[in-house]
Image: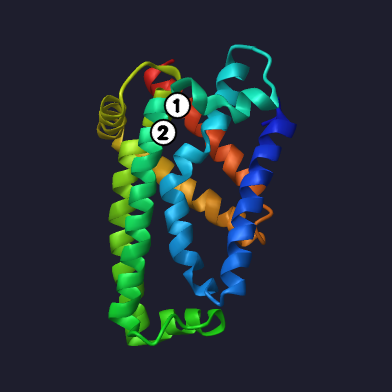
Amino acid sequence: MRRAPVLSLGYGAVFTLCVAALLASLASANLLSLALALAGGFMLVGPLMAVGLYELSRRLSHDQPVTLGDVLTAGLVARGQLAFFGLCLMLVFFVWIRTAFLMLMLFLGTSGVPPASQFMHTLLFTPEGLGLLVTGSIVGGVLAATVFALSALSVPMLLVRRIDVVSAARASIAAIVANPAAMALWGVLIVAIMVLGALTWLVGLAVAFPLVGHATWHAYIAIYGE
């Protein structure tokens, strides 16, 4: 990030603006209470959204010049496999959203999602809300852990190697199995860093997202090389 601050923070700023636009859309539709569910979904597709940062880190590590065009078109190098993997992640994202809606209906009834001003009180101080919180956390945690195992290192690998999605996912799982403590800590740190970024009125996301993206590339290099 110090070597390419403009590109890194610019990438993070674009990501932050997209999140802000989504939250504004939810607010205008009185659906801001769904922000937590969507935040969990973003964590699922995050590895694919950071492809440009992986390419930026790769070029910097080889002391190669890097331009905005290189960052924006990084995914075109392995577009077939990356596109397929992106489709898989988006399918998981939609499954998570549908599951979240189902749990909302099961625990809070069919009267609709409580407004944002009441949602946290409902979630934390009512039996139905606590049930939703516990169940949603368990289901979301299992889904997130599964996706993390499949995608933690597979997306960087697909960027630089001629390899299919299944092989890349198997390699990512193998890295998790071989380094369980380190990779579990890394997953927790990703969530913590992104949450801290979001709590700063989203401003910190412009730093948090590229930080996690660059670090993910270096984690991949530390385990598999290039």
Q: Is residue 50 above or below residue 97?
A: above
Q: Quadrant of residue 68?
A: top right
The amino acid type, in three-letter code, at marker 2 is: Ala
Work out whether residue 161 can be spotted. Answer: yes
- Where residue 84 sits: x, y (%)? 36, 34
The quarter of the picture where the C terminus appears is top left
What is the number of callouts on the image?
2
In the displayed structure, does residue 164 sit left or right of residue 31? left
In the displayed structure, does residue 100 sit left or right of residue 27? left
Q: Which residue is mark 2?
A: 83
Q: What residue appears at the point 62 percent right and 73 percent down from the top-left corner? A: 28
Q: Quadrant of residue 224?
A: top left
Work out whether residue 182 can be spotted. Answer: no
Q: What residue appears at the point 55 percent right and 20 percent down from the top-left corner? A: 58
- Where residue 182 sits: x, y (%)? 37, 36
Q: What residue appears at the point 31 percent right and 64 percent down from the top-left corner? A: 99
Q: Nearer the viewer, residue 107 or 2?
A: 107
Dot 2: within a 10 Å radius of its alpha carbon, few (fewer than 14), some, or many (20 or more) residues? some
Q: Are marks 2 and 1 in contact (CB under 8 Å)?
A: yes
The amino acid type, in three-letter code, at marker 1 is: Arg
In the displayed structure, does residue 42 sit left or right of residue 108? right
Q: Nearer the viewer, residue 101 or 149?
A: 101
Q: Which residue is mark 1?
A: 79
In the rendered structure, find residue 22 and report the number of the disc placed on it. none
